[in-house]
Image (cartoon, grey):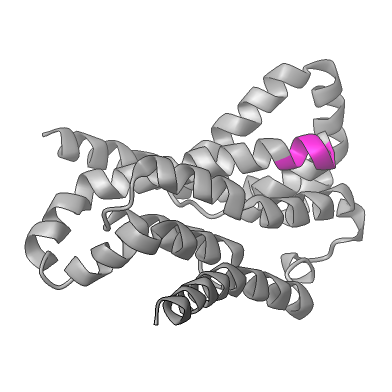
Amino acid sequence: MKKLILLFIAIIVVSAYFYFDLGQWLTLEQLKNQQSSLESYRQANPVLVAAIYTVIYIVVAALSLPGSAIMTLSGGAIFGLAVGTALALISATIGATFAFLIARFLLGDWVQEKFGDRIASINQGIDKDGAFYLFSLRLVPVFPFFVINVVMALTTLKVWTFFWVSLVGMLAGAAVYANAGTQLAKLDSLSGIASPGIILSFVLLGIFPILAKKMIEFIRRKKTD
């Protein structure tokens, strides 16, 4: 019954998002049009605006709604680089953790029951190297964050590990988008932010922790031989 209630609430919120076309407010064009008004309101009500921003971002991330990139841009545009990055990072991490918990609560038991034998080896790898894999995935923008949230939820990865690794792993991406938000007037599209050079840098950063760990394991094996 609890699962049905949670699923019903999620369906209602997501349906309302699309029915009332709330996504129209989470676009680059709208952000550029409303930037001056938002900045003025933020100067008059800094705590209130920060709270509203955080709640909206958490809901967007928790329900995997379109708009996370725009929300991070908004953080930089409204609050500046440092505060915008911090607010976006914390909000995205909390939202992702909620998405992780929702997916685990709704699907976790069913997946473990139906496919427990097949994913046993995956869970063993997650128990051993889960933090490294998650950190690498968070650094590489090739993988949509909502996919990572759901996939990790179906493993045995601990919630706290998911939270703190996501927090650290998403720092670089949050800073890049928030910094782009501070230069909003120069942006014509989101594709300008994730240029091939930046994506390649993230990929290399994502691969590095796994390669480093494998190198350490290789050296240890050589010493014991």
Q: Is residue 204 magenta?
A: no
In the displayed structure image, the side of residue 111 where residue 181 appears, left or right: right
**What secondary structure prevails in the magenta region?**
helix
Question: In which quarter of the view is residue 41 placed?
Answer: top right
For the question of whether residue 106 can be seen, the reply is: yes
Place of residue 100 in the rendered image (x, y in percent of width and height, measured from the top left): 37, 48
Place of residue 128 in the rendered image (x, y in percent of width and height, measured from the top left): 34, 61
In the displayed structure image, the side of residue 21 where residue 157 appears, left or right: left
Assign the C terminus to one quadrant of the image.
bottom left
Q: Is residue 84 magenta?
A: yes
Q: Give the number of callouts.
A: 0
For the question of whether residue 21 can be seen, the reply is: no
The residue sitting at 72% across, 18% down in the picture is 47
The residue sitting at 60% across, 63% down in the picture is 139
Question: In which quarter of the view is residue 180 placed?
Answer: bottom right
The residue sitting at 79% across, 44% down in the picture is 76
The front one of 140 and 18 is: 140
Residue 161, compared with residue 132, is above or below; it is: above
The residue sitting at 81% across, 38% down in the picture is 82
Assign the N terminus to one quadrant of the image.
top left
Place of residue 20 in the rendered image (x, y in percent of width and height, measured from the top left): 49, 43
Give, as a single range, the part of the protein colored magenta.
80-85
Residue 219, compared with residue 22, is above or below; it is: below
Residue 29, compared with residue 74, is above or below; it is: below
Place of residue 135 in the rendered image (x, y in percent of width and height, measured from the top left): 53, 59
In the displayed structure image, the side of residue 6 where residue 91 appears, left or right: right
In the displayed structure image, the side of residue 123 where residue 158 appears, left or right: right
The front one of 2 and 23 is: 2
